[in-house]
Amino acid sequence: MRETGWFGAGYAMTKNLGNARYVPPNDTKPSFLSKAAPALFPLVVAALGYMIGRQFFGI
């Protein structure tokens, strides 16, 4: 017995037209901010903790 649904019949979601071209990916250069962000994250967390602590707890 043959299934007639889109998924049961083995059809692909998109048709391969055969006109795709290979485009090599460009080399991406990481910015200074993306390099410095992991090092600055603890400093930002400490500064936010200090400001919230002063505001709410009067430290």
Image (tube, rainbow, N blue to C red):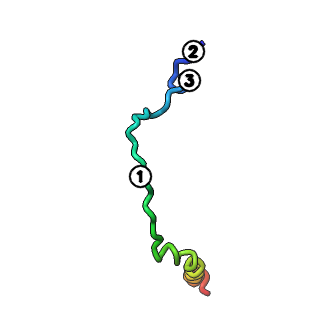
Kindly indicate whether the residue at mark 2 contacts the one at mark 3 (C-beta within 8 angstroms). Answer: no
Residue furthest to the top = 1
Image position, residue 30 (x, y; %):
47, 71
Kindly indicate whether the residue at mark 2 contacts the one at mark 1 (C-beta within 8 angstroms). Answer: no
Above or below — where is 59 with respect to 10?
A: below
Count of residue discs? 3
Relative depth, front residue between 25 and 51:
25
Q: In terms of secondary structure, where does tag 3 sit?
A: loop
Does label 1 or label 2 sit earlier along the sequence? 2
Mark 2 residue crowding within 10 angstroms, few (<14) / some (14–19) / many (20+): few
What's the mark number on residue 8?
Answer: 3
15 left or right of 46 in image? left
Residue bearing the label numbered 2? 2
Q: Quadrant of residue 51?
A: bottom right
Above or below — where is 13 with respect to 49?
A: above
Q: What is the three-letter code of the residue carrying label 1?
A: Val
Kindly indicate whether the residue at mark 3 contacts the one at mark 1 (C-beta within 8 angstroms). Answer: no
Residue bearing the label numbered 1? 23
Does label 3 or label 2 sit earlier along the sequence? 2
Q: In terms of secondary structure, where does tag 2 sit?
A: loop
Q: Quadrant of the C terminus?
A: bottom right
Q: In terms of secondary structure, where does tag 1 sit?
A: loop
Relative depth, front residue between 4 and 27:
27
Q: Quadrant of residue 1?
A: top right
Image position, residue 44 (x, y; %):
55, 79
Does label 1 or label 3 sit earlier along the sequence? 3
19 left or right of 33 in image? left
Residue furthest to the left = 19
- Can residue 55 be seen at all in this image of the molecule? no
How far, Cα to Cα, is label 1 from label 2?
A: 40 Å
Q: What is the three-letter code of the residue carrying label 2?
A: Arg
Image position, residue 43 (x, y; %):
57, 82
